[in-house]
Image (tube, grey):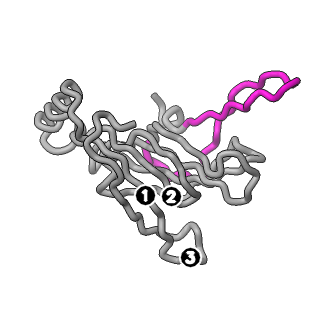
Amino acid sequence: ASEELRRVLWVYPVRQQGKRRTNPKKIELKDYPAGHYFHPLGVKVYPSQSFAEETYMYVINHAKDPNVGYETVIEQFSISWSDPTAATYVRTLRSPHFVSLNALALTSSTSFYVTNDHFFVPGYGPKFLGDSLNLVETLLGLPFSWLAHVSLQPTNPENSSSIVKIEHEGVARGIAFAN
């Protein structure tokens, strides 16, 4: 797939009573870093139904970095309910605790629950070992995944787009395929 196809999210307007159904529309990702691979998985918006000035969209991204290999990150965008077809890139969130992110549930504009559905991930470590351990974990349904709560603490409270400190708290462990 072309680079542009990898950077596509769609918004589907909810049908309102008495109005015709409209077609899905592409969300333009403004200021998204060039060459940054985009493989979206989970997407959530906070607040979920509001016309608040500051609305954030978080996207789990199973990114690919030529120097690192596969890396699971969370992309943060600002988005407006009045024009949901444009999302402006804010930052990429990275943490050693983001192993195999699968789903997220927002609790505020700067905190969320997130699941890691596997402990062993293909492509990490020696190829044969990483792939084999992932296969064993998957086939046996081993309870190695977990749920965590993540909070973003700005290093400069006066600037919401500044660098943030990621606080990670384990909430539930010993789950098979946390989602």
Q: Magenta stretch: residue 17 in it?
A: yes
**Residue picked out by circle 3:** 157
Quadrant occupied by the C terminus: top left
**Residue picked out by circle 2:** 111
User: Sequence-wise, which precedes: disc 3 or disc 2?
Assistant: 2
Q: Which residue is at a point 59% across and 73% down the rendered structure image?
A: 159
Q: Which residue is at a point 23% across and 29% down the rendered structure image?
A: 141
On the image, the x and y values in percent for residue 130 come to: 16, 38
User: Does residue 128 lie above or below 113 as drawn?
Assistant: above
**Tag 1–tag 3 contact (CB < 8 Å):** no
Give me the disc on residue 150: 1
User: Sequence-wise, which precedes: disc 1 or disc 2?
Assistant: 2
On the image, the x and y values in percent for residue 83 come to: 75, 45
On the image, the x and y values in percent for residue 132 come to: 14, 31
Q: Secondary structure at mark 1?
A: strand
Viewer-proximal residue among 55 and 107: 107
Label 2 packing within 10 angstroms: few (<14), some (14-19), many (20+):
some
**Tag 1–tag 2 contact (CB < 8 Å):** yes
Amino acid under label 3? Pro
Range of magenta residues: 8-37
